Image (cartoon, rainbow, N blue to C red):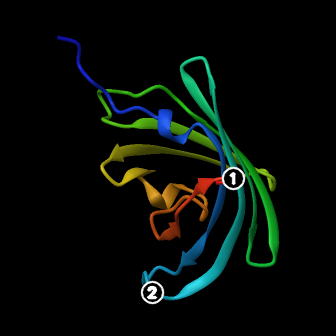
Amino acid sequence: MAVQHPTLDPLIGVWHSRGQVLDEDGATVVATIEGTDTYEWLGPTVVHRADVMMGDRHTRSLEVIEAYDADLGAFPMRAYDDEGGVDDSTATVDDEGCGPSAPQALTPRCASRTTVRPWKAGG
């Protein structure tokens, strides 16, 4: 029997994202987020492009989500933003969906303290 690993298939597509960035206390809203996230397969990896307004700042980023690493129990990721930032992190998948397993390493748009619930554009 083959070992089943989590899949990123449900992420694939164009999504309209809207939410809030919360401060370290997990309650104080420091910015709102609204924009578009696009996920597409590139061989065994997923390419994620984000184009969002974070508060009054327009930001764009590109993230590469690698194939599932069974030893890590997660998907390795590397993100590049439009200010020259590069962040390495991992993501896990559970019944709630896909989320970061190292939120301190992620940009605010992806951090677990960010309450973003994407939905399909036009849907």
Vertical placement of 42 versus 57: above or below? above
Mark 2 residue type: Ala
- Look at the image and tell me whether residue 46 can be seen: yes
Sooner in the amino-acid sequence: mark 1 or mark 2: 2
Of residue 34 and residue 66, the one placed in the foreground of this image is 34
Q: Residues within 10 Å of mark 1 (few under 14, many from 20)?
A: few
Vertical placement of 81 versus 48: above or below? below
What residue is shown with label 1? 121
For the C terminus, the quadrant is: bottom right
> Which residue is located at x 74 percent, y 78 percent?
55
> Which residue is located at x 81 percent, y 78 percent?
56
Q: Residues within 10 Å of mark 2 (few under 14, many from 20)?
A: few
Residue 31 in the image: x percent, y percent? 65, 80
Q: How many marks?
A: 2
Q: Secondary structure beneath disc 1?
A: loop
| Numbered tag placed on residue 82 in the rendering | none
Of residue 24 and residue 10, the one placed in the foreground of this image is 10
What residue is shown with label 2? 27
| Nearer mark to the viewer, of 1 and 2 | 1
